[in-house]
Image (cartoon, rainbow, N blue to C red):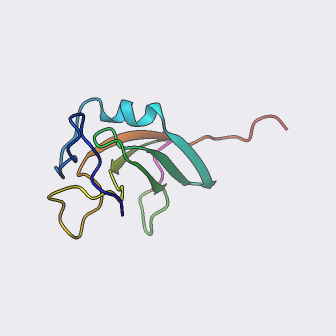
Amino acid sequence: MTQGAPAPDGAPVAYLETSGDDYAARYTAGLRVEGVDVGLVVLHGRCPRCGCAFSCTHTDRVFRSPRRRGPRAYVPVLCECGTRHPGRPADEKGCGAYWNVVVERVTGRGPG
């Protein structure tokens, strides 16, 4: 595990459950989306609060889930970095930041 991610002043970013209006836009600016299977994607990006890289998996398949509602899904994302953040509870990951992103399902196979 690495040491706490530095804040602009060089101090580690403390754990805090928080969100910001710009978190989703900052996260998606450098986001890499890996389509693993139909309905399963892995999001690779950096936390907009602490700057640490992490990956999270999203699936739209859930046991006994309601019928799919369309090609767009609002996905909650939590920082899940492995960096130590002062004050983080032992059973948590990340710095405490959270936000929502829109994941769009691509339908159709394109030319071929």
The image quadrant of residue 62 is bottom left
Q: Which quarter of the image is occupied by the N terminus?
A: bottom left
The answer to which of 14 and 104 lies nearer the viewer is 14
- Asked if the magenta segment contains residue 85, the reply would be no
Please determine whether, in this image, residue 106 is positioned above or below residue 16.
above
Magenta span covers which residues?
A: 67-71
Residue closest to the eye, 57 or 71: 57
Q: Nearer the viewer, residue 69 or 112?
A: 112
Q: Position of residue 86 (x, y in %)?
A: 17, 56
SS assignment for the magenta stretch, majority: loop
In percent of the image, x 24 and y 34: which residue is there? 8
Residue at 35% x, 59% y is 2
Expressed as whole percent of the image width and height from the top left, the position of residue 101 reads 39, 40
Relative image position of residue 79 (x, y in whole percent): 32, 51
Left/right of residue 59 with respect to residue 111 in the rendered view? left
Residue 69 is left or right of residue 17, and the answer is right
Q: Report the residue that reaches farthest toward the right.
A: 112
Whether 20 is drawn above or below 42: the answer is: above
Q: Quadrant of the C terminus?
A: top right
- How far across and down, in percent of the image, does residue 31 sit? 49, 39
Q: Residue at x 37, y 30 (%)?
A: 25
Residue that appears at 56% across and 54% down: 39
Frontmost residue, 104 versus 101: 101
Vertical arrangement, residue 8 with respect to residue 85, above or below: above
